[in-house]
Image (cartoon, helix red, strand yellow):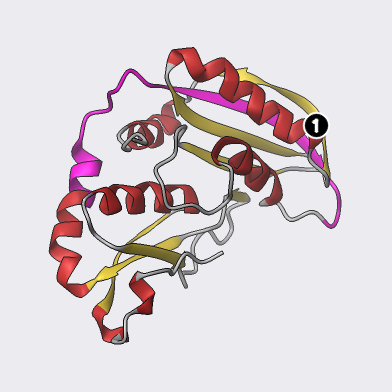
Amino acid sequence: MDRLTTVADTADPGDIVRLTVVPDEGEAVILCGLLQTEGIECAHRRADLAVGMGDASQTYGGWREILVHRGDLDRARELAADLDESEPGGGREAYVVEATLLLDDETDQREPGAAVTVALCGAVAHDDPCRWPHNNEIVAGDGAATFRTLFIAAPEDAAEVRERIKSALNVGAGWTVESIGSREVLADEEELADRLARTPTPE
């Protein structure tokens, strides 16, 4: 679902410009949340990009373009750069839950990720910063799919987040959970984990 409230209601469509594109809706929510805490109106929508062709993996929602008012563009670029360069902190750490799923033939591969996001955030699309920033990915295989959620949480919250993810997958319709468990963050996931860890916490 596109999030084009407020900023897209302007009477002058020429006032709306692209700030950047991000890999999925989770990162779009993170960046828009940061901009909004600084008083910059922001929206995101599906990007018209031919990205990921030939790649069996999907991140939830696909690539998104971030939109801001033209007059806010320079400041928004500074904040986006600060997010990339800031040090992770706040006592939060990265964790991964991974599952093997047998998807029904008619099931959209994005549905397990949507179920997890609802379990962690209350809704698939939201404007406020995530309490537990996360990224979902699914890789289809022969008869089964590997699904993983990488999430950021304080150590005292990690068990609760794991249980929410496992519950969302175990009770979801359209797939069967063949196996599920926790694992370490992989080397090629560390950059994503650092980015998620830099996101603002809800007030």
Residue 155, picture quadrant: top left
Residue 149, picture quadrant: top right
Residue at (64, 28) in percent of width and height? 164
In the depicted structure, whether residue 47 falls above or below residue 79: below
Q: Hey, which residue is sitting farthest front in the picture?
A: 203
Crowd tier of the residue under label 1, counting other residues whose Cα lies within 10 Å: few below 14, some 14–19, many 20 or above: some
For the record, the magenta segment spans 80-106
Q: Is residue 35 visible?
A: yes
Q: Position of residue 8 (x, y in %)?
A: 37, 75
Q: Which residue is mark 1?
A: 177
26 displayed left or right of 19: right
The amino acid type found where label 1 is placed reads Val
161 displayed left or right of 130: right
In the depicted structure, whether residue 168 falls above or below residue 4: above
In the depicted structure, whether residue 86 falls above or below residue 47: above
**77 falls in the magenta region:** no
Residue at (31, 86) in percent of width and height? 11
Q: Position of residue 70 (x, y in %)?
A: 20, 74
Residue in the foreground of this view, choosing between 116 and 135: 116
Residue in the foreground of this view, choosing between 11 and 93: 11
Number of numbered discs overlaid on the protein picture: 1
Quick one: SS at disc 1?
Answer: strand
